[in-house]
Image (cartoon, grey):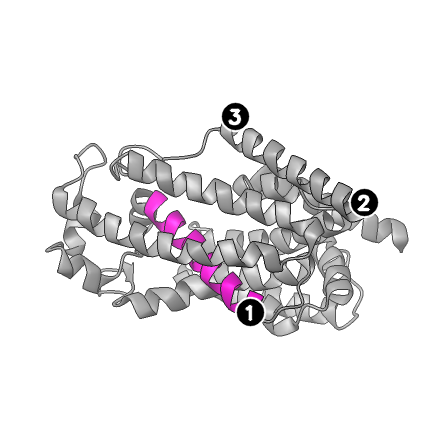
Amino acid sequence: MIDSVAQAYAACETIARREAKNFYYAFRALPKPKRAAVCAVYAFMRHADDLADDEQLPREERLIQSQCWLGEWHAAAAGEPTDNHVFIALRDTQQRFGISTELLDQLVQGTMLDLTAPTTGTEIATYPTFEDLYRYCYLVASVVGLVCIRIFGYTDSRAEALAEQTGIAFQLTNILRDVREDTERGRVYLPLEDLKQFHLTLDQFTTRRADQPVTLDERGLMAMEAGRAREYYRAADSLVPLISPDSRAALWVLVTIYRRLLQRIENAHYEVFARRVSVPTGEKLWILARGLWMAFRLRLVQKG
C-alpha cells in the first residue's frame, strides 16, 4: 500500500508538471510532502476541468460524466477500493491535512459551472452582474485557495477570507488574459452590466476579429476589471504572513507570478485578442529562485 500511495503521488506530480504552468513554479517552493499534496489536489481539479471542457461531447453528456466521476471519487473517499492514482493520492491528502469533502466537491462544482451557466438564447454563457461573476470566481478559484491553505498550514482564521479574496484576484486575471479564447468557446465572463456601462454589446465581443484593435471602450472595461483584481491582490499581502513559514515562499511565488501577469496585460494596453499575454519562463524562474532563497532564509532563522 505504501508503494501504491507513493506511485499515486508521483503520477499526480507528473500531471502538475505537465499542465500546471504558473502553479507548478510555486509548488516547487513547498516542502516535499506539501508539494505532493498540492499536486494531488491539482490533478483532481485538472481531470474535472478536462471532463467539463471536452467540446467533442454535448454539454448534457459532459455534465453526466462529471457527476459520475464525482460519484466515483465519493466511493473512493469512503474507502472503497480504487486503482485511480488521483483518487488514491487525494484520499491520503484529505486524511493528512483535514480537507473537508464539501470543499473538494466545490472544486468539481466550479468546473461544471460552465455547463450550467445561464445563456442569452444564443448559447453564449454569460454573467449578468459582478456579484454573479464573483460566485463563479469563488467556486473555480477561491475554493482552490481554501483547500491549499489547509495544506500550507495556518492558525489565524482571518486567512480564510484572505484566501477567498486572493482567489478572486487570480481568476479575474485569468479572465482578462483569456477573453478571446473564452469567447471562441461561447463564454463571456465580463459581466453584462459592465459591458453596458462602457456602451458595449455582447455581439461586439462574439463577432469581433482577433486582429481588430482594442477600442477605447473595451480598454476602459478591462481596466476597470484589472483595478478590481488589484484591490483583491491586496488580500494576498496580508495572507502570506499568516501561512506556516515553510509554505510562505510558495504562496509568494504564485502571487508574484500572477501579479506580473496582470501587469503585463496592463502594459500591453489590454491587447489580449490578437495574442495571449504571459509571463516568460525566464521571469518565472527568477521569481522561483527568489522564493527558494526566501524559504532557505526562513529555515536558517528558525534553526538559529
Neighbour tally class for label 2: few under 14, some 14-19, many 20 plus, Cα within 10 Å: few
**161 left or right of 73 in image:** left
Q: Which mark is residue 304?
A: 2
Badge 3 is on which residue? 282
**Residue 44 seen in render:** yes
Of the residues under marks 1 and 3, which one precedes in the sequence? Answer: 1
Q: Which mark is residue 17?
A: none
**Marks 1 and 3 in Cβ contact (< 8 Å):** no
- As drawn, which residue projects farthest toward the top? 282
The amino acid on which the numbered mark 1 sits, given as a three-letter code, is: Arg
Neighbour tally class for label 3: few under 14, some 14-19, many 20 plus, Cα within 10 Å: few
The amino acid on which the numbered mark 2 sits, given as a three-letter code, is: Gly
Badge 1 is on which residue? 158
Nearest to the eye among marks 1 and 3: give it.
Answer: 1
The amino acid on which the numbered mark 3 sits, given as a three-letter code, is: Gly
Which type of secondary structure does the marked residue at label 3 adopt?
helix
Nearest to the eye among marks 3 and 2: give it.
Answer: 2
User: CA separation, marks 3 and 2?
Assistant: 33 Å
**102 left or right of 238 in image:** right
Segment tinted magenta in the rendering: 158-177
Q: Is residue 160 above or below residue 176?
A: below
